[in-house]
Image (tube, grey):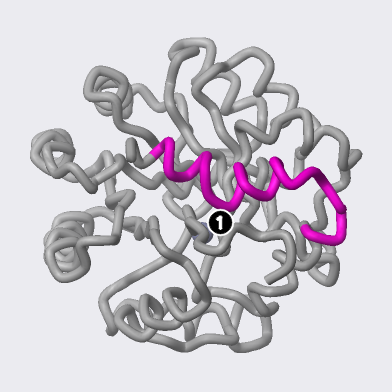
């Protein structure tokens, strides 16, 4: 494809056990009034993305309620075993009695990058003190978080820049990827990059002109922050083709360096390769 590195890294893919995927797709069609484009189970997803020149896949899943993280993470370990080119942000729920011990064991796996917190769905604050031991362990072990902490496509009281800043005030060095470029508060999340050295933004859903939630800052800021932006697709839970987002980014006509970094090198660096 024009302008892209030959092999890319997708830092935001979702893989779930088959049954849970079926339930999520059902939810999607109710919530969005339309079906997702790719009802592919995990092996099909992985094959599909490899055929599209995605060399490394970083996937996540999240525990939408208490009591399911353990099962998901057992599944995650199995999938990492099955696919040596896969990396994972594991599931975590602070209401689980064994949450911290489970997290500690998981982080020993070299391809467990850290945890995904989906605050819109999980409904707790990023600065919830129950999470402090988790954050401290992540910092100590050199791992990361993947956070859905923006107000898109809809917000609630748990997400948004003000809550995220409360977290960063306590842990300014926290290594975290913010999904969706921090949308819908794009400008405010971009400006965090100047103050918090370990924050990155992922492109997921932010460059889909039809979505109504399109990135609304000047394209020059993308170039300025090209070391801190990572490509992610949200595959397979898409209602627009993943190519639309890639084309939209290519149509910005940014530097060759931008595409090389965002679609590959920044991701490879975070994988520690
Ligand atoms: Zn996602």
**Quadrant housing residue 157:** top right
Measured as percent of width and height from the top left, residue 93 is found at 28, 46
Question: Which is nearer the eye, 210 or 273?
Answer: 273
Label 1: how many Cα within 10 Å (few below 14, some 14–19, many 20+): many
Q: Which residue is mark 1?
A: 232
Ligand 1 within 8 A of label 1's CB? Answer: yes
Residue at (62% x, 40% y) in the render: 229
Asked if residue 84 lies left or right of residue 242, the reply is left
Q: Secondary structure at mark 1?
A: loop
**Quadrant housing residue 87:** bottom left
Camera sees residue 185? yes
Residue 243 sits above or below residue 77 on the image:
below
Instruction: Pick the quarter of the image with the C terminus.
Output: top left
Camera sees residue 130? no
Tell me the magenta residue range. 250-270
Residue 211 sits above or below residue 37 on the image:
above
Residue 267 sits above or below residue 21 on the image:
above
Residue at (22% x, 24% y) in the render: 141
Q: Quick check: is 261 in the magenta stretch?
A: yes
Q: Give the prevailing secondary structure in the magenta stretch.
A: helix
Instruction: Pick the quarter of the image with the N terminus.
Output: bottom right
Asked if residue 260 lies left or right of residue 183, the reply is left
């Amino acid at each position: 494809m024009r302008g892209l590195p030959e092999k890319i890294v997708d830092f935001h893919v979702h893989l779930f056990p088959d049954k849970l995927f079926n339930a999520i797709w059902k939810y999607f069609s109710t919530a969005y009034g339309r079906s997702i484009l790719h009802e592919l189970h995990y092996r099909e997803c992985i094959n599909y993305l490899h055929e599209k020149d995605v060399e490394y896949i970083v996937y996540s899943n999240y525990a939408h309620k208490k009591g399911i993280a353990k099962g998901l993470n057992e599944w995650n370990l199995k999938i990492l075993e099955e696919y040596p080119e896969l990396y994972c942000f594991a599931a975590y729920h602070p209401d689980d009695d064994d949450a911290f011990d489970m997290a500690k064991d998981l982080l020993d796996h070299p391809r467990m990058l850290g945890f995904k917190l989906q605050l819109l769905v999980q409904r707790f604050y990023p600065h919830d003190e129950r999470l402090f031991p988790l954050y401290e362990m992540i910092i100590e072990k050199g791992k990361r978080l993947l956070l859905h902490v923006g107000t898109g496509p809809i917000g609630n009281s748990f997400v948004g820049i003000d809550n995220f800043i409360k977290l960063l005030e306590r842990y300014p060095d926290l290594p975290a990827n913010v999904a969706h470029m921090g949308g819908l508060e794009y400008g405010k999340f971009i400006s965090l990059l100047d103050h918090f050295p370990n924050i990155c933004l992922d492109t997921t859903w932010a460059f889909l002109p039809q979505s109504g939630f399109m990135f609304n800052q000047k394209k020059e800021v993308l170039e300025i922050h090209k070391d801190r932006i990572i490509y992610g697709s949200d595959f397979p839970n898409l209602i627009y083709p993943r190519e639309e987002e890639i084309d939209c980014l290519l149509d910005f006509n940014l530097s060759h360096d931008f595409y090389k970094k965002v679609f590959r090198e920044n991701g490879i660096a975070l994988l520690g390769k």
